[in-house]
């Protein structure tokens, strides 16, 4: 072990020829023990590689452990079948292609959809329990131990016109948030597969040969700097950068307006910076998922969301990420959800009541909206909703009814007055098989990435569905782990 | 000279120790002979450095030569004074801070505003002629040889409430587009200052020492690969990346929807990639300036711009870049400018007439907008415009009058049916003095950048003003040139 603190002043790759001796030697070194890192470790170890996982925290889990645990599976999973839903790979492909958004990668989408049932089985074989139950509540995740639900824009304009809908959000059979449960199993499976884990160990730089091959990692542990050789490959699974305000300012300044960072302390971009330090390209860095939890209750989708002009600007039955994105980007963070007494319910993430009045004229006055505009908006909406129509935004029929039972309330969905969660969707450029790419789209030999450390399956919050991050991280984490184990040493 | 074609397969910096011999040696090597490169070359040469400018085209000019030539000067220029306008550094600071947008750099803004009058004088001393004349036409640039005009959002909500307006767009005294004239002078001045120019010479990679210092450039010329040493520094002034579809897809996918790339063939990101190859950080990569030229004629700002819902979404008197940005991002590229017969005029960049009707009910039908919404929008607008008010978007009084003289026309401003120009506003991270930064905000020794090769003064198209790119490129090009000349060898 060495204690040369000066070498930690940069994240540029450390020259291999300057490594005096390796403190440890493995085939595959995985950085980060969240969903992606665990999946990579399990598969690499099962493929026969000598694997170590470096985790800066005192235990595995990462951001996945803080999540709802919802995972996006489809194409005909046993749960879908048991609950009476038909799904197919082509139908899932149609939807995931839309959900992945601008700049998405067709090869990645194909692998993901074609392998989804197998990936579900892999989860089950690890011991993750799923209940054969479906809930039709419009929600971000079932609060019970129920499993299957529509977790994205499957039923929503303009997705529903282009892809046969099926519920694909699968929550493990635990009430409330199930991410910690899911990660307990993945962490245990990491150890059972024979991968070593090194906790309280912070990866700082990659080690790179003169020919450009990544050969290991410089890390710190117990105040010491250590050099860990990766004979076959390094897999970066260290999360996104929502906790790094400097990186947000440089790459995604709009996300700075979000007041709740949906991540763990580890999502500070360290893995992305390490990758960049070896010559890797970073892409899609401005994009993120924005979340203003105006539902559940699902009845809130029967309300209307208006901007500072009193205009509607999104179909309110859209997935929360889509509607929240519109609130931030289209309405500049000035938005209110208007509900009547019948559909009003308390949101899980409490929203301030900006105003409650007996009629819309008073309500628009209380909100200081331009006189007459909210009145017009609701009048137009009500007239068409009574006929089951939404000519402006094609909200689906189940959510169309006139707002007609006073009092009327405005829930504060402004960036100043409500909670905007955010996570990042940009990161290292990779192939579908997890190889990291440089700016010429050439592979950085010996380097792999998965999870939010990479720009993955989903490139836009405005098309996203719940469960896609965990599914992406674990699915492509597995592939990256196998690719690293198979790399020539 | 060497002809090792294999070394051109990457833009990663070439190891200095592998350079067998330098084909040429200079103090300062400047890549690109547009506005930024010429300014850098003039100042570096005047400071006594031995300077060479490498330009891939057969002559200098770059993208600046293709532009209107408008340059943003203020704080009390001789032209402003001669035309009777008061301006001050504090007033300019107030405005430029807003115009620079999110993530802008206060140090850069201060230098720019405090040095603006001197920079104007520098232009004049080079021989650039400006007429002491002002035009109050709302335009992107005077089509005559007139000089001074309001070229941004100075008079526009929400800028006008926060900064005392002054016209700061200065066009050189040539009719039409004056960029070529401007660049003729800057190119001539480059030579007069004693800088060498090497045309038809394409810079491909930086040369970097093991300690990280940039020491030169690998270039190609006449089919040969040449190594050019930079004893003091390399200044990258090779433009943006609007011509590189791969980079747009990775970093700014929305700009792919723009069907006119506002740049020269050189704006393919080559200089940005070279910088990245030396470990430099790239920032603000998703941002660009979007231009749908719905004015001039300035009378068009008296119309209303509506989206696919028939709603207004921007003040129509906004600078073209601001309104166009809203058309693309807020209206998803579905927008129409509605005018009446009195204010209709032909736009310089012709717009298709999507519909012409005698009343708004027929017009909304012809545009397939939701029945009643355009009628409501115009009714609301007209009622308030008659009183000189715009409660929705605070359009300024000179542009407020009811649309009341039939027939009424809708100009097609959709991404499918009209021209959306675009240029990029992301690039290498730099200090205000032009030093290129890595991801840890540390200086890459020996490397400088200016113009669109860097993320410069302006970070957002939605806050931009005409003339800021040329002003930024030349102002900070000068500073970078001096910094490179002063760097220790």
Image (tube, coloured by chain):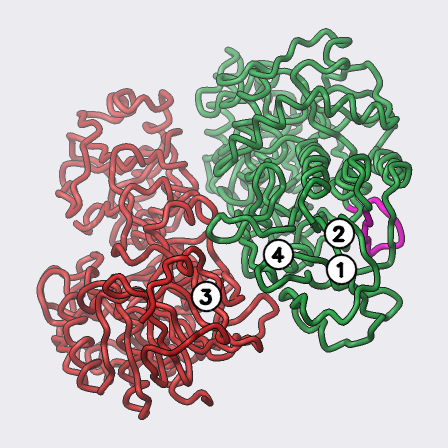
Chain colours: A green, B red
Depth check, front residue: A78 or A114: A114
Callout in the foreground (4, 1): 4
In the image, A119 versus B434, the foreground residue is A119
Q: Chain of mark 3?
A: B
- Find out whether residue A275 is within the magenta segment: no
- The secondary structure making up most of the magenta span is loop
Residue that label 3 marks: B275
User: Which residues, given as a range, are shown in magenta?
Assistant: A51-62
Quarter occupied by the C terminus of chain B: bottom left
Q: Residue at x 26, y 68 (%)?
A: B55
- Does label 1 lie on the same chain as label 3? no
| Chain name for mark 2 | A
SS of the residue under disc 3 = helix
Of the image marks 4 and 1, the number of the one nearer the N terminus? 1
Is B257 placed above or below A129 here?
A: below
Determine which residue is flagged by label 4: A213
> Nearer the observer, disc 4 or disc 3?
4
Checking the image for residue A31, the label placed there is: 2
Kindly report the distance in space between the C-alpha atoms of the residues bearing marks 3 and 1.
26 Å
């Amino acid at each position: 072990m060495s204690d040369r603190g000066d070498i930690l002043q940069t994240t540029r790759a450390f020259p291999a020829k300057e490594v005096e001796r390796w403190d440890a030697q493995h085939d595959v070194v995985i950085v980060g023990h969240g969903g992606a890192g665990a999946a990579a470790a399990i598969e690499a170890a099962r493929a026969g590689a000598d694997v170590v996982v470096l985790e800066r925290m005192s235990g595995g889990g990462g951001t996945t452990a803080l999540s709802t645990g919802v995972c996006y599976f489809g194409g005909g999973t046993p749960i879908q079948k048991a609950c009476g839903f038909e799904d197919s790979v082509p139908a899932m492909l149609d939807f995931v292609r839309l959900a992945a958004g601008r700049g998405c990668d067709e090869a990645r989408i194909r692998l993901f959809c074609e392998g989804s049932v197998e990936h579900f089985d892999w989860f089950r074989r690890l011991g993750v329990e799923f209940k054969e139950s479906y809930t039709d509540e419009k929600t971000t995740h079932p609060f019970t131990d129920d499993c299957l639900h529509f977790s994205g824009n499957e039923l929503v304009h303009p997705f529903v016109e282009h892809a046969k809908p099926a519920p694909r959000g699968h929550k493990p059979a635990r009430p409330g948030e199930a991410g910690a449960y899911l990660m307990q199993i993945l962490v245990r499976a990491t150890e059972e597969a024979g991968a070593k884990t090194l906790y309280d160990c912070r990866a700082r730089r990659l080690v790179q040969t003169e020919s450009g091959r990544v050969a290991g990692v410089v890390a710190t542990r117990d105040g010491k700097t250590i050099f860990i050789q990766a004979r076959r490959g390094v897999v970066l699974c260290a999360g996104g950068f929502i906790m790094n305000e400097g990186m947000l300012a440089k790459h995604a300044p709009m996300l700075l307006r979000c007041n709740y960072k949906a991540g763990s302390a580890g999502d500070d971009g360290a893995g992305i910076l390490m990758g960049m330090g070896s010559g890797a390209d970073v892409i899609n860095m401005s994009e993120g998922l924005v979340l203003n939890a105006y539902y559940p209750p699902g009845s809130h989708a029967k309300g209307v969301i208006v901007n500072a002009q009193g205009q509607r600007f999104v179909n309110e039955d859209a997935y929360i990420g889509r509607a929240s994105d519109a609130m931030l980007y289209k309405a500049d963070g000035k938005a209110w959800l208007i509900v009547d007494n019948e559909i009003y319910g308390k949101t899980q993430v409490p929203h301030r009541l900006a105003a409650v009045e007996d009629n819309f004229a008073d309500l628009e006055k209380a909100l200081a909206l331009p006189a007459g505009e909210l009145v017009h908006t609701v009048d137009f909406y009500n007239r068409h909703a009574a006929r089951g129509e939404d000519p402006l935004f094609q909200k689906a029929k189940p959510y169309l009814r006139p707002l007609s039972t006073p009092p009327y309330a405005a829930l504060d969905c402004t960036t100043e007055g409500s909670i905007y969660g955010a996570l990042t969707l940009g990161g290292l450029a990779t192939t579908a098989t997890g190889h990291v790419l440089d700016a010429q789209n050439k592979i950085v030999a010996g380097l792999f990435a998965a999870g939010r450390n990479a720009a993955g399956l989903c490139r836009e919050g405005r098309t996203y569905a719940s469960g896609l991050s965990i599914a992406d991280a674990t699915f492509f984490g597995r592939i990256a782990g196998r690719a690293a184990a198979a790399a020539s040493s």
